[in-house]
């Protein structure tokens, strides 16, 4: 496979959650959590997906893995449409794409030992033939994530947050996946532990040639780990480009204000902050035209009427904003 | 929490220790029944021997340490062998109804949608019939006999467990570790047994403990009302029903026939109390809210 | 910085708050000293379990007892030792002189009352005003914290507001009685960055117009840099470094502070690899002996493993709890060297 080839391609993906009301649970509307997004993840790269809570970034990740069923669109993984697969095919492809969750406390079964948690994917995909082989393999994987074999027979509650996240990474790694979707993998961790887990993910990526879709709200972390970054706002991708370009020359006003809002760990730093007015609107009834227009400091008439087209403004720097077309 | 820790805590808790001791005592009595009260007829061990044909109960005396009941049935023998009946009713009724409840609740919550709708409406229908009345009517239709009592108790006794299980599973199935297992490609069976059941069985277990006592009481009530075990069958409920006409005592003393009521009454009370103590202790141990204090 | 008087507003001396649990004594706060001057913002930074929240609850007199207990130390607030006050006397101070806002505003607001109701109640509890006046003041407060259409919002319920709006309501409520000290426990952690920027700006504005002191508790060094005048860095129940914010970021002297700063990714710098602090935050049930940071520290020696260092003044207004802070200079130079080579 060529290095530049897309491992994952998302085309016009939509995920609507019905809003039900009344005795007969009539659908009275939809939460448009993910509303027609398209992007691609290249083989071996890390694509960061950032946005504020409720923008649909986690839903995107879970819809790609079919932990949630998509409303419309295509998810092409390695040339095959994941959304069109039947149950059996899907179980097979799950070996290739894995997920790491945010909450290291909720994502491990409290009643299973570490050996069983990491051994589970091996059992499911029949990657080992006997118990001894399974133990060897588990030991191997534990070592790769920086945990010793003495932890094998312990339960999750005996571990700290950082160690649990390592176990979560080990479980995802056990099936030798090509793609890992990391859903806020470090945001629940202590500051001094975040760096450890980020370093671990990078080391593993180098060692195994993994491809990451890294979902996070922390722009500094995303900047550090990603090759390219996509910014989501209210179910839409508003900008996507190489990380250098995004952080140095953001095109979309939302990206600009998001970047300026981050508190900088330097009391002498100059701040010309763009403070956005108001809150993120509800995805049940998103604003007309450009979804960002009610909060956009640069909005003009056209923004509330017409939805801007998501297009390339040079060298794969995509954005959706009327200002850019002027 | 692990099993050994739970058990260790059960023994540390005074109330549950009392419960455990009482249950152990009853269990011992049930096991040693043939030694404590040797049956006259080895083929019909549950048939209470009679001391004669007098209708009036007779007080404790040589050979009949608890006295004899209406119709001269030996209370001691009835109590000892009745312990076996109590355990049998408890285990079988609670066991089968819990199994039904767990299955219905789990399937309902896990698959959701139409299945859930149908299962829960059926549960509602069963719930809407008063338990004791339903059990009585059903036993009457099926005919007298302990097995029929148990069938009636099972048929109308699984709904609470089903509802509890459903709410538990609904909660657990959205946990991230379940999602993780789905993402790993696990099939429904593995997810249900390894991840969901293992994590929501405890509340159901607590409820089952509580129901052990109440089922024996209900069975006794049915016997008392005359739709339970056939006459002469060693069953605590039956023993009390023998006392029905003698509860008010004789002409000179209200307590004249005390042994006909107090003895089987205390046994039933202690039996259900002990299971409740155990259930309570279990809940205290497993309730995360109470654990936060530690 | 405008210091209204030389006398500090709050002086915490040798504070120890322990929790007596089944598993043992949790020394959540184990010898904390700091002061807050009138009108100053003290940033308290540290990771989970470092005792920063328990410190603030101790000041508020809100440590749940049992199992918690202030076993040692003083909290002097305007000349009174708060640890000696009865619950009743504390209630007069809480909300009136000292108020607090929390990380999750939803749990601190009662869902069955309108927000106007709740702010009015706070006002009436401490000021002798009637209902109408309290409501008028509530609307005024809501306006001050930047809630649009305060006359309408005052009759709404907490669930009708967004997270950012709820935090504004909490701020309005806590400021309604002109407190001298506002304790903010991770007030923006649950909020999105764009909303966080709004709230931080609001707090800075209000601090200026009200002249109150703020104790800002957070794990986010960015927030600390943004709002603090002075900073106390906490680790394992103790203050390990205490100085003004410029010095702290320019010249951190405790290996933990330094390590923390190096471990976070920065927007304005690109590095290949983050310099993680090894190991994990120790459990308060099981702190290492000697210096509590010794098992993660690059400078640790046998001395560190045996004897715990005191908080030492190393220059005017700069205190550090470390035996070897002077050697940190060497590590800093080494790091600068390798950066140059690259």
Image: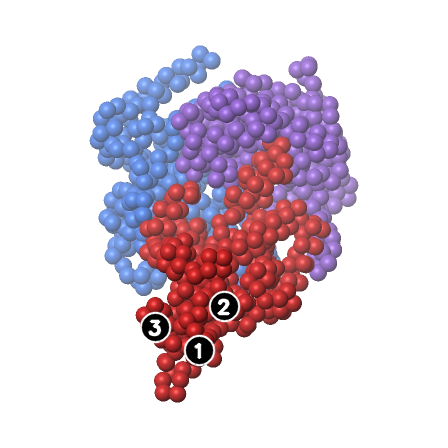
Chain colours: A purple, B red, C blue
Q: Please say if C37 is above or below B262.
A: above
Parent chain of label 2 = B
**Residue C202 visible at all:** yes
**Residue B170 visible at all:** no
SS under mark 1: loop
Total tally of numbered discs in the picture: 3
Sequence-wise, the earlier of marks 3 and 2 is 3
Give the residue pinned by disc 2. B232
Marks 1 and 3 in Cβ contact (< 8 Å): no
Sequence-wise, the earlier of marks 1 and 3 is 1
SS under mark 3: loop
Q: Residue at x 37, y 72 (%)?
A: B67
Residue B181, horizontal then vertical, whole percent: 58, 35
Residue A277, horizontal then vertical, whole percent: 60, 46
Give the residue pinned by disc 3. B60
What is the quadrant of the N terminus of chain B in the image?
top left
Give the residue pinned by disc 1. B54
Residue at the extreme right? A306
Q: Residue at x 38, y 38 (%)?
A: C46
Q: Please say if C228 is above or below C250.
A: below
How many residues crowd around disc 3 within 10 Å: few (fewer than 14), some, or many (20 or more)?
A: some
Q: Please say if C94 is above or below A55.
A: below
State the CA–CA distance, disc 1 to disc 3: 15 Å
Residue C244, horizontal then vertical, whole percent: 35, 36
């Amino acid at each position: 496979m060529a290095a530049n080839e897309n491992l994952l391609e998302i085309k016009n993906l939509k995920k609507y959650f019905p809003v039900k009301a009344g005795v007969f649970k009539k659908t009275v509307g939809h939460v448009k959590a993910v509303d027609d997004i398209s992007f691609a993840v290249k083989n071996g790269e890390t694509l960061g997906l950032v946005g504020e809570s409720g923008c649909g970034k986690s839903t995107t990740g879970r819809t790609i893995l079919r932990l949630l069923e998509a409303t419309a669109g295509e998810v092409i993984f390695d040339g095959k449409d994941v959304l069109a697969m039947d149950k059996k095919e899907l179980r097979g492809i799950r070996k290739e794409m894995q997920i790491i969750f945010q909450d290291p406390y909720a994502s491990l079964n409290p009643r299973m030992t570490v050996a069983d948690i990491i051994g589970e994917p091996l059992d499911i995909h029949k990657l080992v033939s006997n118990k001894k082989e399974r133990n060897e393999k588990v030991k191997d994987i534990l070592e790769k994530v920086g945990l010793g074999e003495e932890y094998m027979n312990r339960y999750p509650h005996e571990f700290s947050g950082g160690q649990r996240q390592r176990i979560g990474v080990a479980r995802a790694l056990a099936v030798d996946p090509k793609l890992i979707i990391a859903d806020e993998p470090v945001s629940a961790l202590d500051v001094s532990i975040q760096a450890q887990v980020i370093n671990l993910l990078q080391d593993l990526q180098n060692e195994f040639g993994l491809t990451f879709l890294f979902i996070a709200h922390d722009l500094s972390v995303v900047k550090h780990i990603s090759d390219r970054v996509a910014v989501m706002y209210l179910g839409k991708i508003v900008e996507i480009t190489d990380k250098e370009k995004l952080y140095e020359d953001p095109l979309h006003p939302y990206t600009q204000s998001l970047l300026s809002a981050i508190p900088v760990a330097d009391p002498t730093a100059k701040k010309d902050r763009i403070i956005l007015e108001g809150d993120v609107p509800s995805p049940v009834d998103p604003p007309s035209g450009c979804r960002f227009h009610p909060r956009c400091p640069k909005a003009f008439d056209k923004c509330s009427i017409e939805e801007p087209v998501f297009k390339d403004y040079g060298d794969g720097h995509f954005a959706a904003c009327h200002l850019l077309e002027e | 929490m692990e099993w050994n820790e739970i058990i260790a805590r059960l023994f540390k808790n005074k109330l549950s220790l009392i419960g455990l001791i009482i249950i152990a005592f009853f269990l011992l009595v049930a096991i040693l029944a043939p030694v404590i009260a040797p049956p006259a007829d080895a083929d019909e061990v549950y048939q209470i021997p009679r001391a004669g044909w007098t209708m009036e109960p007779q007080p404790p005396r040589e050979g009949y340490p608890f006295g004899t009941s209406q119709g001269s049935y030996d209370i001691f023998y009835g109590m000892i062998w009745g312990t076996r009946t109590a355990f049998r009713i408890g285990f079988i009724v609670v066991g089968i109804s819990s199994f039904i409840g767990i299955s219905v609740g789990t399937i309902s919550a896990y698959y959701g949608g139409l299945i859930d709708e149908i299962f829960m409406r059926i549960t509602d229908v069963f719930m809407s019939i008063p338990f004791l009345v339903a059990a009585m009517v059903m036993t009457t239709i099926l005919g007298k006999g302990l097995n029929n009592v148990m069938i009636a108790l099972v048929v109308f006794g699984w709904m609470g467990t089903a509802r509890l299980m459903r709410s538990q599973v609904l909660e657990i199935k959205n946990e991230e570790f379940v999602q993780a297992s789905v993402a790993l490609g696990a099939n429904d069976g593995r997810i249900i047994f390894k991840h969901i059941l293992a994590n929501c069985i405890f509340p159901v277990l607590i409820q089952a403990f509580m129901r052990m006592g109440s089922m024996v009481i209900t069975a006794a009530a049915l016997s008392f009302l005359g739709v339970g075990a056939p006459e002469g069958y060693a069953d605590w409920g039956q023993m009390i029903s023998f006392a029905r006409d003698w509860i008010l005592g004789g002409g000179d003393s209200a307590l004249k026939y005390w042994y006909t009521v107090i003895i089987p009454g205390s046994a039933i009370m202690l039996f259900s109390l002990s299971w409740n103590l155990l259930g309570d202790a279990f809940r205290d141990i497993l309730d995360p809210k109470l654990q936060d204090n530690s | 910085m405008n210091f209204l008087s030389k006398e500090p507003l709050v002086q915490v001396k040798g504070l120890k708050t322990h929790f007596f649990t089944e598993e043992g004594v949790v020394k959540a706060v184990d010898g904390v000293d700091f002061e807050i001057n009138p009108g100053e913002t003290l940033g308290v930074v540290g990771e989970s379990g470092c005792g920063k929240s328990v410190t603030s609850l101790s000041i508020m007199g809100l440590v749940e007892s049992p199992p918690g207990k202030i076993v040692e130390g003083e909290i002097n607030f305007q000349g009174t030792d708060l640890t000696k006050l009865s619950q009743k006397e504390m209630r007069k101070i809480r909300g009136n002189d000292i108020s607090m806002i929390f990380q999750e505003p939803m749990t601190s607001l009662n869902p069955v009352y309108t927000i106007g109701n709740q702010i009015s109640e706070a006002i009436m509890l401490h000021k002798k005003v009637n209902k109408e006046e309290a409501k008028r003041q509530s609307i005024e407060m809501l306006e001050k914290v930047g809630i649009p259409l305060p006359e309408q919002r005052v009759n709404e319920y907490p669930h009708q507001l967004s997270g950012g709006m709820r935090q504004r309501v909490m701020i309005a409520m806590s400021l309604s009685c002109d407190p001298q000290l506002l304790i903010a426990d991770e007030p923006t952690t649950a909020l999105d960055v764009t909303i966080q920027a709004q709230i931080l700006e609001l707090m800075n504005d209000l601090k200026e117009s009200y002249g109150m002191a703020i104790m800002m508790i957070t794990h986010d060094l960015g927030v600390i840099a943004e709002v603090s005048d002075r900073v106390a860095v906490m680790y394992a129940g103790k203050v390990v470094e205490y100085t003004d914010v410029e010095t702290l970021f320019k010249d951190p002297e405790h290996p933990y502070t330094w390590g923390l700063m190096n471990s976070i990714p920065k927007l304005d710098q690109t590095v290949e690899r983050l310099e993680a602090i090894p190991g994990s935050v120790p459990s308060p049930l099981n702190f290492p002996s000697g210096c509590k940071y010794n098992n993660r520290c690059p400078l640790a020696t046998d001395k560190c493993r045996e004897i715990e260092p005191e908080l030492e003044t190393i220059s005017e207004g700069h205190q550090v709890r470390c035996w070897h802070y002077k050697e940190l200079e060497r590590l800093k130079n080494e790091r600068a060297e390798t950066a140059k080579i690259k």
